[in-house]
Amino acid sequence: MTSFADDIEAGGTDRRSRRRAETKAEILRLAVEEMAEHGAAGLSMSRVARRLGVQPPSLYKYFDSRMALYDALFGIGQRRYLRTARRAAEQAPPGLAGFAPVLRAGARWSAENPVLAQLMFWRTVPGFAPSEQAYAPALELRRDWAARAGAAVERGELGAGAAGEEGLDLLASLIAGMVSMQLSNEPGAGFEGSRFLRHVDRIPALFAAAYPPPGAEEAAREKRARTT
Amino acid sequence: MTSFADDIEAGGTDRRSRRRAETKAEILRLAVEEMAEHGAAGLSMSRVARRLGVQPPSLYKYFDSRMALYDALFGIGQRRYLRTARRAAEQAPPGLAGFAPVLRAGARWSAENPVLAQLMFWRTVPGFAPSEQAYAPALELRRDWAARAGAAVERGELGAGAAGEEGLDLLASLIAGMVSMQLSNEPGAGFEGSRFLRHVDRIPALFAAAYPPPGAEEAAREKRARTT
DNA sequence: GGCTAAAGCTAATAGCTATAGCTAATGCTA
DNA sequence: TAGCATTAGCTATAGCTATTAGCTTTAGCC
């Protein structure tokens, strides 16, 4: 979370546009610092301006309002989270087993970006509602999960309902619970050695316990017989 | 969440003390209304005063600061949540099976008191940290869970780690996930027909899947053989 | 009925978001 | 290189907010 330079599309290639994009990125960076100190809902335009070495009204040349700043951060967070998950998915095995590395990558990202995660997953900033555009990546990610769950069902690793809305809601709750506990009880603790996120690797097994594939117990018995 | 009259200890029995306690309860009620409209972090002393028909500084005769008001609500919420869980526990079967009604009661309470639940479980109000006294019931509840999990281990319903810190963290994450998803995606939806809280009854089974008792699979096979 | 303490008030301070309108610098273009 | 439009900054201001100080009135106990 050091730089937001790649997240701001410069309107043009002139020097002016480039400098403007740099300033915007700088403002976002300072805003995240602010939120880390005062909580996600505690972002203050005045304090950001002070950090930037500028009078408060000047910020409005770059962001229309405090809520617009939140929306930019929300959108950047969602895009980065999606990208992180997809990168992990590329190298993950297909089906159920692949959930572990994907979810772990997401959990790690949340631990490393607690401020953005709060904004994205809790939405507790009074008056803030993300724009449709900023929210779009979250819908894409859910589609990714649905596809993976569907593949797992086809492979006989999960029961039928797992890939439906109900199953995905359960899956989302499992991951949300660990991230949520982490953020509220150990914010800023990082991923390694985290009290709550260490359970993320258990999620595929828990999910499978909730939606066992047909004939799971028989398969388990056979497997045990083979290995012992 | 209609009245806070029972949550305010009147300093004495005189008319004055009684009226003072009534006003405090009224302020708390209006504060919750405010938070329901503007988000937990969006509580405004001025707006509460306006609703009460009083000038803002007058509120400070009843609560030392905005944070003191939050602390009172936090403490009341924790006490009520604990009481709700314990009432459910009285009628619940012992051991693992008893977790379902207890957790369900807690989930229902959270759905019916989304504002207090946000304040208690997310703690996203900038500058607010609960007092030790207000937080105490949460520790008591965790001890209740530990006792129940320990009993379940002794009864052979759960594996050894379930009653330790790690197991309780997982259990807390499971319930927190469902409540969290509910609060951020369907606030004010109530308990019945909730998209996420309906999964609460699955928690004991998921917990058992994460901490299977020794010989669980053999027992399951025998049971199946008996019933079929 | 008188006195005390509680409960309200007004005034004021300091901080916040946001807008209006001005000035000066910047950097593209002719 | 000179001109000039755009941009980026500024100050001033309005209308919020929380909170404190200090005064006045009301209420209710003895």
Image: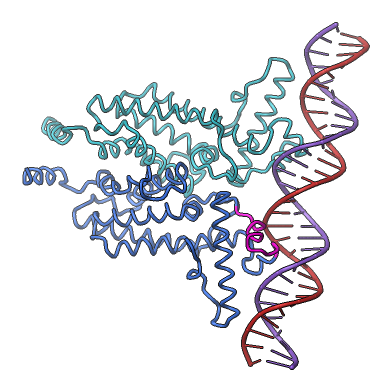
Chain colours: A cyan, B blue, C purple, D red
Instruction: Report if residue B112 lies within the magenta region.
Output: no
Principal secondary structure, stretch drawn in magenta: helix
From what the image shows, is residue B15 above or below residue A70? below
Give how far across and how far down residue A82 sits, in percent. 47, 28
Instruction: Report if residue B50 lies within the magenta region.
Output: yes
State left or right for residue D19 relative to residue A127.
right
From what the image shows, is residue B156 above or below residue A174? below
Give how far across and how far down residue B70 sits, in percent. 56, 59
Q: Is residue A200 visible?
A: yes
Q: State the quadrant of the C terminus of chain A.
A: top left
Query: How many marks can you see?
Result: 0
Residue nearest the viewer, comparing A45 with B39: B39
Give how far across and how far down residue B118 sits, in percent. 49, 51
Give how far across and how far down residue A48 sits, in percent. 69, 39
State left or right for residue A87 relative to residue B208.
right
The stretch in magenta equals B43-57
Residue nearest the viewer, comparing B52 with B9: B52
Q: In the figure, residue A154 lies in which quadrant?
A: top left
State left or right for residue B151 relative to residue A119.
left
Q: State the quadrant of the N terminus of chain A.
A: top right
Q: Is residue B174 visible?
A: no
Q: In the figure, residue A49 lies in which quadrant?
A: top right
From what the image shows, is residue B122 above or below residue A210? below
Query: Which residue shows up at 24% across the image and 57% down it?
Result: B95
